Image (cartoon, rainbow, N blue to C red):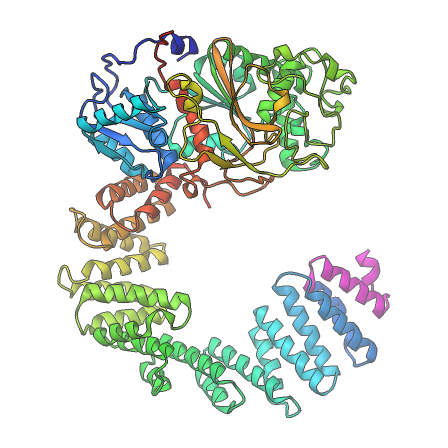
């Protein structure tokens, strides 16, 4: 579903929809007629992350679900049936059968509180931008999707440059370096086999796609991604992908890449020549010129790999939005925890001074000069940036063992990722004003 | 560089330097081969070199480094007098034992134990370690004799620990009477636990259960307590006071004859009435067959299938879900992920209250590739 449809959809009552049976179930004519299952998302839930998968697959099968924003941690209401119960039992997801009277009572509670019920209509087609040689356990979103059982496709530069993004509703970027400098590990990890492979893959892709250098290729990819958002796509980026995507867009006409990446030194006047009007989220950033420092600019607040600038980890707090007035940011912060321990990434956070005026801050560290989680519109689409690499691996070092999410089924950080996956499924009601 | 330091014309000091380099580079045996001829005869110089080599070996990881440390200390002990020699030989024995060289360790310890010049505590320590080695080598009579000869030189606690180790070794040989003799008047919780195993292998299930309960969770190490708890759970399912077939089958298992134990447990289960621990005994047999692997997998599958199909309603105790989980794991081991998934799903849905459901979910996630293999 493109954002245009998302915006133009009208009405809260969902009409008759005859989709494929969800493992033998038939969609109901109206939402929440008996029997109904509530998937609680507060502390009563036995597996928060898999609950998103159950909801996603129900929508995918054509069932009409509702996301109860700010009600018991952002619960889901689904038509009851043996197939859904089976799904939930297998996944270890806690469900509560609710009768008509209880549903009415829940709706009453929602009406009188800062809460809302958002219909979930269509399971978004999910793409994860990932190089072909990257192991599946090196990306928090891939791990979350696999654990929750949400299907996705992997795409990379050839698909993006070839116009393949139009086939997807939702795109995720993780720790790709869109400045084309191999995360600035080129000199620091010189000789490491994984780095050599990364360089080889990228150089081959650039050559095959007709670009003079990897930075040129990545700039083009960044523009395709921006256009995808402009045309109504949903973009969710984490870690370095956030900062470097905007740097690549702002540096469309200036060389900011180290000479090892494109054969020429960066423009000494690069900072002055950056065109931030081309970027999605940030403005006024200063590029880190040292090729031996694995930092890209002063957009990142924590500077994990910059000696002398590295900041300690704290905790970030999610904002409490009005579910009825601001349903989109409200969806993105649904959680059973409001304060979440911070976690490093090559880009961990975003300095407040570098945010564009229209950005919506979803989560920040109170009193700190940085924020953690931001959202905004571009054209007909939206983007959401979440700093850090892996919410359950705060220090994340290269070569660390992969995170096993079955040991973190209640991870509030991972919930934020899955909020983003489900949010394009939501049907926005018509605003009365 | 090594060639230059170790050539035929190299001086002893140069060869020692080459040996130390090899040691530091993780090639201890080659280092010792080069080093040993340079310290073949006693001298002040050789003593110092041996001490230095042994100390350096402590910084190198791995069993080979431990072995060369033991060899160096043994040679050092040959060259130094009195208490220093005893101390070095005892340390050498420990290093050799850690390196898996039981013969070398035993030889060193026997020297210490027989050395009249050795201090009493050094002798006691050497004898205790020697008893351990003799038990490990299956020389139980020698171990018993050595233990008896230690007199009062061992602390009561050390003596008791060695006696229990000897009992366990007797049990593993099926020598129930001799094991019982060693425990005769001992009423400690450890002894009660061991007596429980003796009773169990004799088929006296009631006495075994009583003794295990009396021993409680504190006897021996944690693993032993877990084994006793598992056995108590099995005995409770069976309920009978006596069952010589089951005792004999479990004794086969204790003696390490797992293949024969599978058949014996199956026969013992066949003699039990339905609902009296039959499936639980079959489960033990199935788990052993699965652990054996290879051709025994077929037997394991037969047993698991019998347990699972015998309880279609899902209300027959803990054995059916545990059997289905084991079955799924066996299938996963054989690369049949799809079949394993079907069993895991059946388990989770049929026995939602089973204690093995969380484990089954993890296996299911692994089988589907939803979590990394760890």
Residue at (19, 72) in percent of width and height: B243
In screen coordinates, is B173 left or right of A303? Answer: left
Tell me if residue B16 is in the magenta stretch.
Answer: yes
Can you see residue A432?
yes
Q: Which residues are magenta?
A: B1-29
Question: A157 left or right of A56?
Answer: right
| B81, above or below A90, in the image | below
Residue B43 position within the rendered picture, expressed as x and y whole percent measured from the top left: 82, 80
Q: In this orientation, which residue lies closer to the viewer: A90 or A371? A: A371
- Main SS of residues in magenta: helix
Q: Is residue B12 above or below residue A107?
A: below
* Quadrant assignment, res B193: bottom left
Quadrant holding the N terminus of chain B: bottom right
Image x and y of residue B283, in percent: 26, 57
Magenta stretch contains residue B180:
no
- The answer to whether residue B279 is left or right of residue B257 is left
Q: Residue placed at 48% from the left, 12% from the top?
A: A381
Q: Residue furthest front?
A: A112
Closer-to-camera residue (B67/A105): A105
Query: Hey, which quadrant is residue A272 in on the image?
Result: top right
What is the tally of numbered marks visible in this picture?
0
Residue A207 visible here: no
**Where does residue B127 sit, x and y in percent of width and height?**
55, 84
Indicate whether A43 appears above or below B106.
above
Residue A397 occupies which quadrant of the picture?
top right
Toward the viewer: B356 or B333? Answer: B356
Coordinates of residue B344 in the picture (x, y in percent): 29, 43
A337 and B295: which is toward the camera? A337
């Amino acid at each position: 579903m493109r954002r245009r449809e998302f915006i133009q959809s009208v009405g809260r009552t969902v009409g008759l929809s005859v989709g494929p049976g969800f493992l033998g179930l038939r969609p109901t004519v109206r939402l929440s007629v008996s029997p109904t299952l509530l998937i609680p998302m507060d502390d009563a839930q036995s597996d928060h992350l898999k609950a998103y998968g159950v909801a996603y697959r129900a929508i995918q099968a054509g069932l009409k679900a509702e996301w109860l924003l700010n009600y018991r941690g952002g619960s889901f209401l689904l038509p009851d049936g043996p197939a859904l119960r089976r799904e939930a039992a297998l996944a270890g997801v806690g469900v509560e059968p609710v009768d008509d009277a209880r549903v009415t009572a829940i709706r009453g509670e929602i009406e009188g509180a800062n809460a809302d019920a958002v219909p979930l209509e269509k399971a978004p087609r999910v793409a994860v931008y990932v190089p072909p040689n990257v192991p599946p356990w090196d990306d928090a979103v891939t791990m979350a999707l696999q654990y929750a059982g949400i299907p996705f496709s992997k795409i990379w530069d050839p698909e993006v440059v070839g116009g393949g993004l139009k086939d997807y509703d939702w795109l995720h970027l993780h720790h790709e370096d869109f400045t084309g400098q191999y995360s600035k590990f080129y000199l620091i990890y010189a000789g490491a086999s994984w780095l050599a492979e990364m360089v080889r893959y990228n150089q081959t892709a650039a050559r095959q796609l007709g670009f003079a250098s990897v930075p040129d290729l990545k700039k083009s990819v960044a523009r395709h991604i921006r256009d995808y958002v402009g045309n109504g796509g949903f973009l969710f980026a984490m870690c370095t992908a956030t900062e470097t995507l905007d740097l690549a867009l702002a540096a469309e006409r200036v060389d900011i890449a180290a000479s090892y990446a494109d054969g020429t030194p960066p423009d000494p006047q690069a900072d002055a020549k950056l065109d931030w009007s081309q970027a999605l989220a940030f403005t006024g950033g200063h590029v880190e010129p040292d090729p031996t420092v694995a930092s890209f600019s002063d957009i990142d607040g924590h500077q994990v790999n910059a000696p002398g600038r590295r900041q300690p980890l704290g905790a970030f707090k999610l904002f409490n939005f009005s579910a009825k007035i601001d349903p989109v940011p409200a969806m993105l912060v649904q959680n059973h925890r409001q304060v979440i321990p911070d976690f490093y990434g090559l880009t961990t956070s975003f300095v407040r001074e570098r945010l564009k005026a229209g950005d919506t801050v979803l989560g920040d560290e109170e009193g700190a000069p940085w924020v953690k989680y931001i959202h905004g519109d571009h054209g007909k689409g939206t983007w959401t940036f979440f700093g850090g690499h892996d919410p359950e691996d705060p220090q994340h070092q290269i070569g660390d063992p992969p995170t096993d999410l079955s040991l973190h089924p209640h991870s509030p950080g991972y919930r934020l990722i899955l909020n983003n996956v489900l949010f394009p499924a939501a049907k926005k009601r018509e605003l009365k004003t | 560089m090594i060639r230059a330091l170790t050539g035929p014309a190299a001086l002893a000091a140069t060869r020692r330097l080459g040996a130390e380099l090899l040691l530091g580079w993780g090639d201890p045996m080659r280092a010792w081969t080069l080093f040993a001829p340079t310290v073949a005869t006693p001298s002040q110089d050789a003593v110092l070199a041996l001490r230095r080599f042994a100390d350096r070996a402590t910084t190198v990881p791995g069993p080979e480094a431990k072995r060369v440390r033991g060899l160096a200390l043994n040679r050092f002990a040959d060259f130094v007098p009195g208490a220093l020699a005893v101390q070095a030989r005892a340390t050498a024995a420990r290093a050799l034992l850690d390196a898996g060289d039981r013969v070398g360790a035993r030889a060193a310890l026997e020297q210490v134990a027989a050395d009249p010049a050795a201090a009493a505590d050094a002798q006691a320590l050497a004898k205790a370690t020697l008893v351990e080695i003799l038990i490990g080598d299956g020389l139980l009579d020698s171990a018993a004799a050595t233990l008896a000869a230690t007199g009062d030189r061992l602390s009561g606690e050390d003596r008791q620990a060695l006696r229990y180790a000897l009992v366990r070794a007797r049990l593993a040989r099926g020598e129930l009477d001799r094991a019982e003799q060693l425990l005769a008047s001992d009423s400690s919780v450890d002894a009660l636990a061991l007596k429980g195993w003796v009773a169990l292998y004799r088929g006296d299930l009631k006495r075994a259960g009583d003794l295990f309960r009396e021993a409680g969770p504190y006897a021996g190490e944690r693993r032993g307590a877990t084994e006793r708890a598992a056995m108590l759970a099995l005995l409770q399912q069976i309920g009978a006071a006596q069952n010589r077939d089951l005792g004999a089958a479990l004794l086969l298992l204790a003696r390490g004859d797992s293949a024969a134990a599978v058949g014996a447990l199956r026969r013992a289960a066949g003699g039990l009435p339905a609902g009296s621990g039959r499936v639980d005994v079959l489960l033990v047999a199935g788990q052993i067959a699965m652990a054996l692997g290879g051709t025994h997998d077929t037997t394991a599958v037969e047993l698991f299938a019998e347990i699972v199909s015998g309880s279609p309603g899902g209300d027959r105790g803990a054995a059916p879900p545990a059997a289905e989980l084991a079955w799924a794991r066996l299938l996963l081991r054989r690369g049949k992920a799809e079949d394993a998934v079907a069993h895991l799903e059946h388990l989770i849905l049929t026995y939602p209250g089973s204690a093995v459901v969380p484990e089954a979910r993890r296996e299911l996630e692994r089988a589907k590739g939803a979590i990394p293999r760890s």
